[in-house]
Image (cartoon, rainbow, N blue to C red):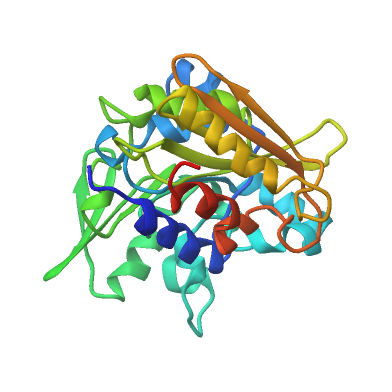
Amino acid sequence: MRPPSRQALASLFVLGSLAVGGTGCSGSSTGAGSGEADNRTGLQNALASVPESAAAETVSYADVAVIRDLIAKDSEQFGGLGNYGIPELATYSDETPRQEWGFDEKTVATSVVVGASNSRLTGEFDTATIAKALERKGYRASDTDGGTLLKKTGDETTYQVSDSVRVARHDSDGAGLGFGEPERSVAGDPAYAAVDECLGNVYYASFYGKREKKDVVLLAIGARLGADGSSTETLCTVNSSEAAAQSAATKLREKTKDGEPYAGAKVTVRNGETHIVSMTWRNSSEPRLRPRDNDKTNILPGLLLLTGRS
């Protein structure tokens, strides 16, 4: 695995700057068709679709259906999630997404993005319409197990489309993304499993890539909705040791003091096999406190990933 530190921050900064985000307090199906998938949270389904080989890459999850509702209710607070975690919606074009790509956010239920723009979308797709749109871009369609494969001569990008899943692979980071779940996924990685448990049933999550032999092994930020409909974000880290966890907690607590943007936020250290540190704050329409603002500013991730232990 290549160390992602600054690269991981840069990838998510690009995604955040393009307002690629997502939401979801639901257990949306991944199209795997198993009872186990139906009983998992949306984030757990998303992680189960990402191959273990991509553990060092940035991974973003979005529940598009929930985002649509949140933006409709409060665009000032949630408008930064307006591309719904769908990379194609961040491209500039004179055409609508449906004209250019054969689908739009109304047909998408969930999104997973691996690396810069490799994606796996679930929802309801018209394969013929998508194939026609991509054929206009020079791609040729052929049948593949479970759906349609689209490739272009001289281009490493490939698309797979079925009635319920659309996969876009642009580089080797997306290898292993497909209609179903890989035999070995990041969901089976202890660090990812620990962060998943720490985040809970979120409507979006950004994982900054697993880092071997670092104080902060894995960092992620996700948001969830309370019973009253309010949104909170939680940063979770898996740390290499108790000392590394205490160092991370100390740095985060500096940001929770009076006068700081995250004043009053709660920082918790849970030592054990994975040495978890978490910090939770309430979202609002204020700068830095809107959902996914950290993907754009890198304030908290940069504090922990780009500095050594205090």
Q: In the orientation shown, which residue stands out farthest toward the front?
A: 310
User: In the image, is 128 to the left or to the right of 108?
Assistant: left
Give the x, y percent position of residue 194: 48, 23
- Residue 48, image x and y in percent? 39, 29
Between 58 and 107, the one lying in front of the other is: 58
Q: Residue furthest right?
A: 228
| Residue in the picture at 71% in, 59% down | 288
Residue at x 80% of width, y 64% of height: 76
**Residue 280 x/y as whole percent:** 71, 37
Residue 269 seen by the camera: yes
In the displayed orientation, state which residue is furthest to the left: 154
* Residue at x-position 34% and y-position 47%: 57
Q: In the rendered image of this protein, does residue 267 appear above or below residue 233?
A: above
On the image, the x and y values in percent for residue 154 come to 11, 71
Question: Closer to the camera, 174 or 157?
Answer: 174
Q: Quadrant of the N terminus?
A: top left
